[in-house]
């Protein structure tokens, strides 16, 4: 029996709720010791539930656990160096979870509530992945984005990282407010790649869901 058969059906909803909770917590708890702890715990909750979602195969659980484990170091060693390492692992981890969820989503043959939860969660995870990527890029290649110097001195999980997460979702949704712009060539091309990825994902997802819905109606 696959491990996923033992999972409760609301695990997909749990992942989506943890993502929404992160976006509700992050803007209001960005400063101070307790703010950092709140953000760390919200990120860890996403990682733990995501590992739970990767339980179809034992090998995937091990890989997900290894990639998620550095995030716990921030609770013990809250330094810039640990931030960079944990963010790099987080980026790879979220990419891995996106792959797992997309594989499950496109293997299902019915439009269920769980499939909808998964689809929305993947969209959130894509935005978070790119936000982390931009944060690492800004740290390694300063002035890649139009951010103030004060923000860049605060660290990863304060205004610096949050503004780039905001920029990521503005780019993913192709809103284009223009308050934050890409300045370096790597930042510009990565932003274009994310924008294209967001549009392609929505187009393929809608086509897939419509196709499954028509197939369900024909069988009934």
Image (cartoon, helix red, strand yellow):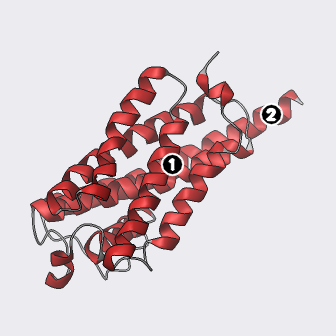
Q: Nearer the viewer, residue 190 or 128?
A: 128
Q: Is residue 176 left or right of residue 81?
A: right
Question: What residue lies at 33% left-to-right and 35% top-to-bottom?
Answer: 66
Q: Quadrant of residue 127?
A: bottom left
Q: Which mark is residue 36?
A: none
Residue 75 image point, x, y percent: 32, 58
Residue 201 image point, x, y percent: 49, 48
Residue 218 image point, x, y percent: 84, 31
Q: Is residue 131 left or right of residue 200?
A: left
Q: Is residue 24 above or below residue 5?
A: below
Q: Nearer the viewer, residue 117 or 57?
A: 57
Element on which disc 2 rests: helix
Q: Is residue 217 left or right of residue 164?
A: right
Residue at the front extreme of this rendering? 76
Residue 133 appears in view = yes
Q: Is residue 187 above or below residue 27?
A: above
Question: What residue lies at 42% left-to-right and 77% top-to-bottom?
Answer: 29
Q: Nearer the viewer, residue 9 or 199?
A: 9
Q: Where is mark 1, residue-wise?
A: 122
Question: What residue lies at 31% left-to-right and 53% top-to-bottom?
Answer: 193
Q: Residues within 10 Å of mark 2 (few under 14, many from 20)?
A: few
Report the Cα–Cα distance between label 1 and label 2: 23 Å
Q: Is residue 139 left or right of residue 21?
A: left
Q: Where is mark 2, residue-wise?
A: 216
Residue 87 image point, x, y percent: 27, 53
Q: Quadrant of the N terminus?
A: top right
Q: Is residue 151 above or below residue 78?
A: below
Front: mark 1 or 2: 1
Q: Residues within 10 Å of mark 1 (few under 14, many from 20)?
A: many
Element on which disc 1 rests: helix
Residues under numbered marks 1 and 2 in contact, where contact means CB atoms less than 8 Å apart:
no
- The mark nearer the N terminus, 1 or 2, is 1
């Amino acid at each position: 029996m696959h491990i996923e058969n033992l999972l409760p059906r609301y695990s997909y909803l749990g992942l989506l709720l943890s993502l929404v909770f992160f976006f509700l917590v992050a803007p209001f708890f960005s400063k101070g010791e307790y703010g950092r702890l709140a953000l760390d715990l919200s990120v860890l909750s996403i990682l733990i539930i995501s590992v739970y979602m990767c339980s179809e195969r034992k090998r995937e659980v091990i890989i997900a656990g290894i990639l998620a484990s550095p995030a716990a170091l921030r609770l013990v060693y809250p330094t810039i160096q640990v931030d960079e390492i944990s963010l790099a692992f987080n980026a790879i981890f979220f990419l891995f979870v996106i792959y797992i969820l997309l594989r499950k989503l496109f293997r299902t043959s019915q439009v269920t509530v769980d499939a909808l939860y998964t689809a929305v969660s993947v969209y959130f995870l894509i935005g978070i992945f790119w936000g982390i990527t931009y944060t690492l890029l800004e740290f390694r290649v300063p002035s890649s984005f139009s951010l103030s110097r004060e923000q860049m001195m605060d660290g990863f999980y304060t205004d610096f990282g949050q503004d780039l997460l905001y920029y990521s979702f503005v780019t993913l949704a192709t809103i284009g407010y223009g308050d934050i712009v890409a300045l370096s060539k790597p930042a510009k091309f990565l932003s274009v790649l994310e924008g294209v990825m967001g549009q392609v994902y929505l187009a393929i997802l809608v086509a897939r869901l419509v196709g499954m819905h028509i197939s369900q109606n024909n069988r009934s």
